[in-house]
Amino acid sequence: MTFTLFIDYLGTFAFAISGIRRASAKRFDLFGAIVVGFATGCGGGTLRDIMLGQTPFWMQTKTPFWEGGYTYLLVVLFALLFVSVLGRYLLRMNDTIFIFDAIGLGLFTVVGIEKTLACGFPIWVAILMGMVTGAGGGVFRDIFINVEPLVFRKDIYALACVFGGLVYLACTSMGIDSVTTQVVTALSVIALRGIAMTQHWRLPVLRRDVAEYDENDTRAWRSFGKAASEGVDHFNLQVVAVSMQDISEINDSDASVVELCANADCGGLTPDRDLIRNACAQSRLPVYVMIRPKADDFCYSDAEFGQMLADIKFVAEESKAEGITVGVVTPDGKVDVERMQKIMAAAGRLKVTFNRAFEKVADPATAYALLAKLGVGSITTTVLPTLDLLPRAPVRLRIGGGITPEHLPNLRSRGLMCIHMGRAVRSKLTFDSSVDSSKIWDYTHA
């Protein structure tokens, strides 16, 4: 067995783990996990071989078996066993898995280039096939789990493969020997991938075209349909993030949604715009940005409300946020309908969650009905005495505030499958400490 083939298997193993972990977060069964793991580990090379008119590499039965062929299927099955046995402990190995993933990306880029050149294609085609080999598996993975492919919107991933191809071209042009060229190419991909991740580099994005939504459409009375939590058997967990480090740690957890805010100790305030832009760009989960200019209450002056509308406009037009978390009530404990209409109009494409201002309303049932008419998608609240009197749709109820794993069976029995966690999923139960992915696992898989 050559060292290159060993690393090839190692890269396939790491990619398969990535796919299987994503499948686990989506609650796929064992067969589904194998399919996603195999697509992630072998999808890029398969697509490359088909485009080159070759038999896909994993379909080639070779003797002895360690030279390739069906061994790739065994690698995927071993990755499934690895994830199944280690489970939550694997969440503590994110840095190690990332290193393996980067190594696999670099090697697969080289393999793709070499195989394409061996088939007689020009170097520019080889560079593209190197990119397909390295990044294609991730595209298949994201399509299978029904999310927007990461390589098209987030990290410098596919671009790292193209960069490696250009390094390969430069080395061959200078007459450097084949082995050295391959090593330098792989290392260049690994280095760019690692630097981009640690420094949060990303490509500039195209400004959203106005055709995506009509800015002149001020119809605030909308409905987003039934709550997405209907019919699911696992908890949909929203985790509070206050920094880029939080985003990085939540990315590879089993959380479903991120709530981005500042000053979380006082209930959360609007984060600064650089954090909004960068966090939404780096997050692999939908991000809801807190819109709240002060911590005292949920009644705002005209100046404060004007700032809220400006912040919503920024989030909608200058970030990749999924939605906002906001709440406005009147001094006498009612939903401020007039201002909420303006918020819904300003939100445009953004989904809207009504925050814990809901706990300040005097009549939760009436407030719920008003928010449903406004088109609010969800409400964040503690376990109110009147909670069981509220419908579960069209507005979903997301429960937070002092929840422990012991509370989850009761919430499940009451049809409350969306939860919101802050300190409880951190290593030291403070927002100054790091997010603990194993605690997130405990809540989502309860």
Image: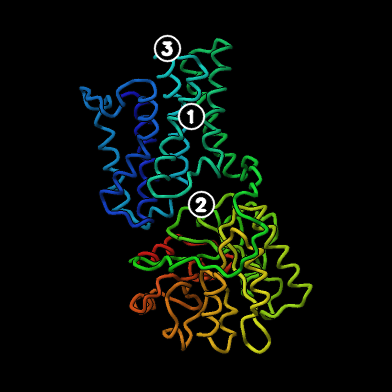
Q: Quadrant of residue 155?
A: top right
Q: Earlier in the sequence, mark 1 or mark 2?
A: 1
For the view shown, which residue lies furthest in the top direction? Answer: 175
Label drawn at residue 131: 1
Count of numbered tags = 3
Residue at image position (73%, 63%) is: 310
Q: CA distance from mark 3 to mark 1?
A: 18 Å
Q: Is residue 405 above or below residue 55?
A: below
Q: Is residue 277 above or below residue 223?
A: above
Q: Position of residue 349 (x, y in %)?
A: 59, 58
Q: Position of residue 370 (x, y in %)?
A: 55, 79
Residue pointed to by mark 3: 120
Q: Amino acid at mark 3?
A: Gly
Q: Quadrant of residue 347?
A: bottom right
Q: Is residue 255 above or below residue 297?
A: above
Indicate the secondary structure of the residue bearing disc 1. helix
Q: Earlier in the sequence, mark 3 or mark 1?
A: 3
Residue pointed to by mark 2: 284
